[in-house]
Image (cartoon, rainbow, N blue to C red):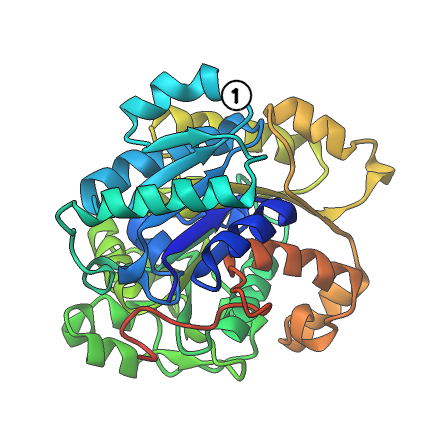
Amino acid sequence: MSRVMLVSPSRDLARRVRTAVGDDLTVLAPEQLPAGPAQLLALATDPDAVRVVLVDVGEDDAVTDRCMDLSTRLEQAFPQVGVLLATTRGEELALRAMRAGVRDVLSPDLGVEDLRWVLRRTEEASATRTPGPRVDDVFTGRVITVASPKGGVGKTTIATNLAVGLAGQSPQGTVLLDLDLQFGDVGAALDLEPASTLGDLVTGAAARDVIAMKSLLSRHGSGLHVIPGVASPVEADRISTAQVSALVELLKREFRYVIIDTAPGLGEQTLAALDHTTDLVLVTGLDVPGVRGLRKELALLDELDLHPATRHVVVNMADTSGGLSVADVEATIGRGVDLVVPRSRKVVRSTNEGRPIVLGQPRDAVSKGLQTLISRLAPVTDGGGPSGRHRGRLGR
């Protein structure tokens, strides 16, 4: 049972909080924060037992903004859960935190006894509030969309490796959707010969019935469920954005992780997926057209007010011999790069063999880089290993 959830990069703070509350604790790194309050609580051992969420924002304005938004949404959906803010900028943030519903602002250097007192006081105050709905009643999985402004940057390679990596943590709770309607090749990248495709799942009984939908999913050896792209571009023209949106809505209620591989650019189908997206993985190479395209794509997302809670920028097939550096990319797009994946012939070979490199060569430098991205999305429990517990209807 977890009464307290701590979001912090600090092992020392985690140690002090654990000393204060015992084993009733779930610890997340800041980059592992899911999009919504129900998804956050669902990561605890017993979501309905959580009474305090302590977020250590440090000096990071982005984490601070996410904490404020999370506090407001928790206050509305789960008033029985109190949010505490740990920061060295208490005076600066106090008024804003109060308006966001944060119960208290405290120093991250508090001793164990002071932490125990603050946490107990917050728990007692939370106990007087009317409980919101059970987490199981509102839980939806994380929707992770992999996108890029142009083709040829290894987007499908990132998507398939990410999907099988997450399936290793939640084999019954992970699904990969190929939404590159014209020329998607997820099936080939995973060496699958599917009996059904996306076109079959958005029509007939599968579009309305969970059991019918699941019966049409392809299954990879890793345990990953797969929805391959359509058989022909002609069939793709018959799939509407409403059908795509309805399918993603169904998938996120049944799976812990929904990974979506999209077509290059921001077409209608991709925009429909982004309406449900909690984590956006943006992929580019070290080339001028790709980096400029990424800058335009980020600007367009802001203009359309499409703001997934978490964005991960990946520079794939990185090779500085072309004259561009990662620093150039960051200067152009106005934000940091989260992951750099080096160029490797082994990736090409693994793709041709239909065996993702994280499975075939887990110790390779490329695999280790991709595991970094996977770990951002697969929180670690107090037991020291990735959490494989699935809170959706599958695997209960």
Front residue of this view, candidates 13 and 200:
13
Q: Quadrant of residue 104?
A: top left
Work out which residue is located at the far front of the displayed protein and give it.
Answer: 113
- Secondary structure at badge 1 equals loop
Q: Which residue is mark 1?
A: 89
Numbered-mark total: 1
Q: Is residue 282 left or right of residue 203?
A: right
Q: Is residue 346 left or right of residue 75?
A: right
- The answer to whether residue 276 shows anywhere in this view is no
Give x and y (percent) for residue 87. 52, 29
Please identify the quadrant where the C terminus is shown.
bottom left
Identity of the residue drawn at 64% across and 32% down: 336
Label 1 packing within 10 angstroms: few (<14), some (14-19), many (20+):
some
Give x and y (percent) for residue 186. 51, 67
Q: Is residue 141 left or right of residue 383?
A: left
- 48 in relation to 303, above or below: below
Which amino acid type is shown beneath numbered disc 1? Arg
Give x and y (percent) for residue 11. 64, 49
Front residue of this view, candidates 38 and 363:
38
Q: Quadrant of residue 347?
A: bottom right
Please identify the quadrant where the N terminus is shown.
bottom left
Front residue of this view, candidates 246 and 349:
246
Give x and y (percent) for residue 127. 21, 49
Q: Quadrant of residue 227?
A: bottom left
- The answer to whether residue 312 shows anywhere in this view is yes
Identity of the residue drawn at 52% across and 21% down: 89
Identity of the residue drawn at 40% across and 40% down: 118
Q: Is residue 135 left or right of residue 3?
A: left
